[in-house]
Image (cartoon, helix red, strand yellow):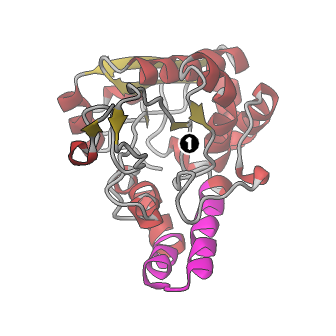
């Protein structure tokens, strides 16, 4: 919730003056909630993901222990609610003065470009003074800016290492998370107090039902604090000839066919 402003052209003037944003812009929860209402989840899934994706309320994917289907934890796409939140942000100054900054995606990733473009377009519909410019950059440059905490808004995903909620929750929410640790010191302070203790409990708990409730509580925190925009959980199709035998669905195995476990595949009649 704090952006590194040193030599950072991505936040414009670095002030809330209509020509940029201050480094602590996202520390105001109304800003975060406004953007959470601004993303067109269902439209994105239908038009960009071609229907091969589902909604997700937080960092835990469907099919993994602790996934929550509580409808209250899903932000809806609502320009009206986004407007209401933005009007509350920064004591009304944001709405009056506007903002200007960049949204980042890795160059060549058309799905992330579309997500960035949509957020930019709807922001301008809510308030013409909201100027969000999507920028595609090379992966090396993307990572450098990310690791130095200079990106105002960025798009990124996570491929599983093992089928357990602890492979996702710390990544997106922990003070030392692969992604969340680069949200700025203000977020890290929040996470150390409100997130890390639950992550520790979830890791140590041996009762399956109790453990699931811990991760559902983390999802509630992710929603209530609007920590990130959880855009979608991707799906896909597997196609093979009838004589190919031995294939099975493995949610941890990324990509097809390169990600298939060929050891189990055989050709049959």
Please tell me which residue lies in front, 53 or 263. Answer: 263
- Residue 203 in view of the camera: yes
Q: Is residue 25 above or below residue 189?
A: above
The part of the chain drawn in magenta is 195-222
**Would you identify the image quadrant in which residue 155 lies?**
top left
Q: Which residue is mark 1?
A: 230
Q: Is residue 267 above or below residue 113?
A: below
Please name the residue shown 31% across and 56% down the image. 161
Q: In the image, 102: left or right of 129?
A: left
Nearest the viewer among 21 and 262 is: 262
Q: Nearer the viewer, residue 121 or 113?
A: 113
Q: How far across and how far down the image is residue 85, in percent?
A: 74, 39
Left or right of 1 in this view: 30: right
Residue at x 54%, y 23% (from the top left corner)? 49
Residue 167, percent from left and from top: 39, 61
Find out whether residue 11 is within the magenta segment.
no
* Quadrant showing the C terminus: top left
- Image spot of residue 118 (x, y percent): 57, 19
Q: Residue furthest front?
A: 269
What residue is at 42 percent from the left and 26 percent from the top?
A: 239
């Amino acid at each position: 919730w704090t952006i590194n402003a040193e030599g950072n052209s991505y936040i414009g003037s670095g002030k809330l003056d209509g020509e940029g944003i201050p480094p602590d812009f996202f520390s105001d929860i109304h800003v975060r909630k406004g953007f959470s209402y601004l993303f067109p989840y269902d439209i994105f899934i239908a038009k960009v993901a071609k229907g091969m994706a589902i909604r997700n309320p937080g960092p835990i994917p469907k099919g993994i222990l602790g996934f929550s289907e509580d409808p209250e934890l899903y932000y809806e796409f609502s320009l009206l609610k986004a407007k209401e939140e933005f009007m509350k942000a920064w004591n009304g100054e944001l709405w009056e003065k506007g903002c200007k900054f960049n949204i980042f995606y890795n160059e060549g990733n058309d799905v992330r470009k579309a997500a960035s473009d949509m957020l930019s377009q709807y922001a301008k519909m809510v308030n013409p003074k909201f100027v969000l410019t999507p920028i595609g950059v090379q992966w090396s440059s993307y990572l450098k800016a990310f690791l130095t905490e200079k990106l105002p808004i960025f798009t990124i995903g996570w491929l599983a290492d093992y089928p357990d909620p602890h492979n996702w929750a710390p990544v997106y929410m922990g003070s030392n998370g692969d992604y969340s640790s680069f949200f700025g010191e203000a977020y890290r302070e929040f996470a150390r107090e409100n997130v890390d203790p639950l992550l520790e409990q979830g890791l140590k708990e041996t009762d399956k039902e109790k453990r699931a409730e811990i991760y559902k509580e983390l999802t509630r925190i992710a929603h209530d604090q609007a920590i990130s925009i959880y855009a979608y959980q991707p799906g896909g199709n597997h196609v093979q000839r009838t004589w190919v035998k031995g294939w099975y669905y493995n949610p941890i195995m990324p990509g097809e066919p390169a990600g298939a476990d060929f050891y189990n595949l055989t050709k049959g009649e």
